[in-house]
Image (cartoon, rainbow, N blue to C red):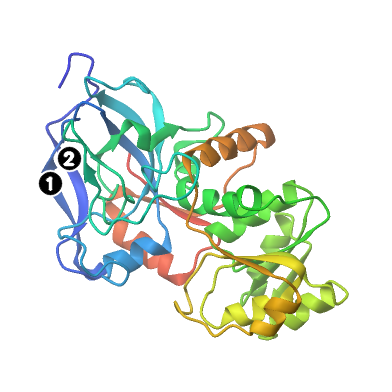
Amino acid sequence: MSPNSLVAADTMTSWEVGTFGLSHLAAVKRPVPRPGPREILVRVAAVSLNYRDKLNAEGVLLPDLKLPYSPASDAVGEVAAIGSEVTRFRPGDRVMTHFITDWIEGPVPPARPVAGDRTTDGTVYGGTLGGPLPGVLSDYILLHEESALAAPPSLSDTEAATLPIAALTAWFALFEVASLKPGTTVVVQGTGGVSLFGLQFAAAAGARVIVTSRDAAKLERAKALGAAAGIDTGRRPEWDKAVLELTGGRGADHILELVGGDNLVRSVRAAASGGRISQIGILAGTEASVPILPLMLKQVVLRGIVVGHRKAFEAMNAAIEATQMKPVIDAVYPFDQVPQAFTHLDRGPFGKIVIKVR
């Protein structure tokens, strides 16, 4: 490493699966990698989990993923060393990962089935962290300098680690591909990370937020965060009718669809004329049969959301600083309890699950 390197060891611990399945998740020792010309080496401080991480570790989303594989994509840490051509960061800077590494602004780049493209300087650039690109559940990770950004100063490491997927997905849906206005009605489904970030962002913008959940206690906690109403889907599985009742028959202006599958049918029915549905989650499946007539007659906009670009990430961070908003964290696990963190994720947290690496 260079003389200004902050690397304290030659080896690091990395949590990996050598065979698909969370039961095969194990901590292994690896050499600390060296940054290429445009790469930064980050000493990881905290990692947050997303449901995608579980699906990838189980071989569901990317069955051709090259093994062994380290899960997770959302991390914050300190730049420990930089390549010879890096200009965006210096050792000691506090940075976060950016999920779609080469999506800086504009339209989303084409999906890559392999782990990025090899650039002329030998650096791998492009693709998504945590599959097919390597994940971040390690003491140290390599990032292309364009694939990182400064962490918000007002947030701790554990708080900042929650932002790259969950927060940016909600922000991008509400403020980048849409333009949320005060007084509109927003429905968020469930109380996971994306849902609660959507609730907080929408409420801060002056929207009326309705939350759906099968857990009455979680609905009360959501109201404490600013939700105007909650729908217990255990008691009222036809939640679309409840939304229409709560809005005087008008429906919701924007729905964050986080369940997927046939739940999308209820989202179409619950949408207002000219309303928008942001398709984000696939918990109930990746296919659905949607009623076309309500979609047409109400002129509902159905838009797929796949996180967001770095420019939007920077705008979101500025808004977080301006409002002093704090992410909702359900639990923080030490680095030696990664399997327990995934078990908690599978139970359905209220907000985010974070792993404190150091």
Number of residue marks: 2
> For mark 1, what is the residue?
29
Which of the 4 image quadrants contains residue 235? bottom right
Q: From the viewer's perspective, is residue 191 above or below residue 173? A: below
Q: Residue at x 48, y 79 (%)?
A: 284
Q: CA distance from mark 1 to mark 2?
A: 6 Å
Which of the 4 image quadrants contains residue 146? top left
Mark 2: which secondary structure? strand
Which of the 4 image quadrants contains residue 256? bottom right
- Horizontal side, residue 191 vs residue 268: left or right: left
> Which amino acid type is shown beneath numbered disc 1?
Lys
Frontmost residue, 282 versus 27: 282
Task: Give the mark, 1 or 2, whose residue is nearer the N terminus.
Answer: 2
* Residue 41 shows in this picture: yes
Frontmost residue, 43 versus 118: 118
Please state the horizontal and vertical placement of residue 272, each as a whole percent of the image. Answer: 77, 71
Frontmost residue, 90 versus 127: 127
Q: From the viewer's perspective, is residue 283 above or below residue 111? A: below
Q: Are marks 1 and 2 in contact (CB under 8 Å)?
A: yes
Q: Residue at x 37, y 54 (%)?
A: 110
Q: What crowding class fits label 2: few (fewer than 14 Cα within 10 Å), some (14-19), or many (20 or more)?
A: some
Please state the horizontal and vertical placement of residue 85, each as a whole percent of the image. Answer: 25, 20
Mark 1: which secondary structure? strand
> For mark 2, what is the residue?
12
Q: From the viewer's perspective, is residue 15 above or below residue 152? A: below
> Which amino acid type is shown beneath numbered disc 2?
Met
Task: Classify the position of the C terminus by image quarter.
Answer: top left
* Residue 233 shows in this picture: no
